[in-house]
Image: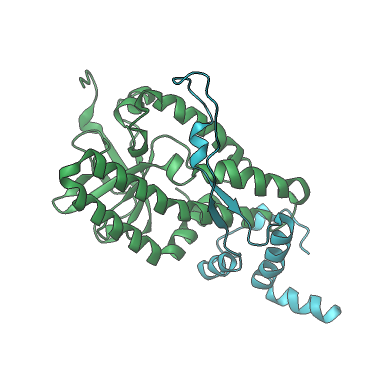
Amino acid sequence: MIRTGSKIENYQLEIIDLWTPNLAITKYSSDTGLSILEDWFLDIEYNEFSREYEYGDKYYKHLAELNKLKKYLNNVLSDIYYRVLFSPNDLKEIMKPGDIIKLEEYISDKPFNIKDDVRIYSFHAYYSLYPKELLKKVVPEIFDSLYATTKDDSHFKIYITLRSAEVSFKMLKLLLDSASSYLEFKYFNEKNKYSNEIETIKANLNKYEEEYIKNSFCITLSLINI
Amino acid sequence: MHHFKFDQYLSRDLLKDDIILKLFKSLEDLKFIKSKKKKRNKKDLYEFDDEEEDEDLFDVKLPKGDVYKDFETFKERASDILYPDQKRVRYTKS
């Protein structure tokens, strides 16, 4: 695809936080020179391969659902520029919050390397941290039900923030399964490489569930600044 | 119970790491159940259905099935974790 006039040299990710050794929260820098629309069509996701043409529309639909969640949580990473990065390597050994990842090209559906042997699997934060089950099941069936009678209750906010973190964590593993299946399908020659690494990421994710919950909880309640 | 504007008191001092994890562990795990696919009668093979993607959603169930009961249980446990001294006073009075 021809990208006339894009400032590709400025296309970079800033590390916002490291939730576990294998999971980083990042954000595209604001000087990419790209419009949001341009991002939508260049930055196709794993589970979008059959509906690439509807990508922008899909973001708006998900965003509308996210607005219902924002009613309850202090801080939702709904900006399209937030990305969740996974790696089978220990990211805490090679990066820290505030670091910049300079990208040689736009992030596509294919995992990319930031060093010779450190591969990165990238997802949009808005749907990987806030899965459909959270927005379409938990919010209406649990949060909305409780809100009607307990909105002023002192523990309500803690309860819903923890429940959100729980659903987010459990659904991440399914997201990674979905990515693994997709990469097997699209990059057949390299399928074992990717699926083995994703299994490593999932195993490590399980080990650091408490770290994930704690960091998700603190950001969502705005207990730490990002 | 605690009748104050709680958001103002949700600080890192109160919610230290070990407290957050105790609160999390005090929750009963949600259950995720694969939902059955709905049968749809499409008039047109190429008709786009907005809700079609929802068929892949898991049903999310509370362990005891009652959202109010689950929250009440959490409140009791959370009060013990957040305010252990107040718990002692409360039980003494009763």
Q: Residue visible at 33% across and 60% down?
A: A21
Horizontal and vertical percent position of residue A97: 34, 52
Q: Is residue A72 visible?
A: no
User: Is A120 located above or below residue A207 in the figure?
Assistant: above
Nearer to us in this view, B1 or A181: A181
Nearer to us in this view, A224 or B61: B61
Q: Residue visible at 46% across and 47% down?
A: A129
Q: Residue furthest right?
A: B94
Q: Residue A159 occupies which quadrant of the picture?
A: bottom right
Total of numbered circles in the picture?
0
| Colour representing chain A | green
Q: Is residue B54 visible?
A: yes
User: Is B39 located above or below residue B46 in the figure?
Assistant: below
Horizontal and vertical percent position of residue A69: 59, 41
Q: Residue A187 occupies which quadrant of the picture?
A: top left
Q: Is residue B39 left or right of residue A80?
A: right
Horizontal and vertical percent position of residue A216: 48, 54
Q: Residue visible at 51% across and 67% down?
A: B17
Quadrant holding the N terminus of chain B:
bottom right
Horizontal and vertical percent position of residue A190: 17, 46
Q: Is residue A10 left or right of residue B46?
A: left
Q: Residue furthest left?
A: A116
| Colour representing chain B | cyan
Q: Residue visible at 23% across and 38% down?
A: A186
User: Is B38 located above or below residue A54 in the figure?
Assistant: below
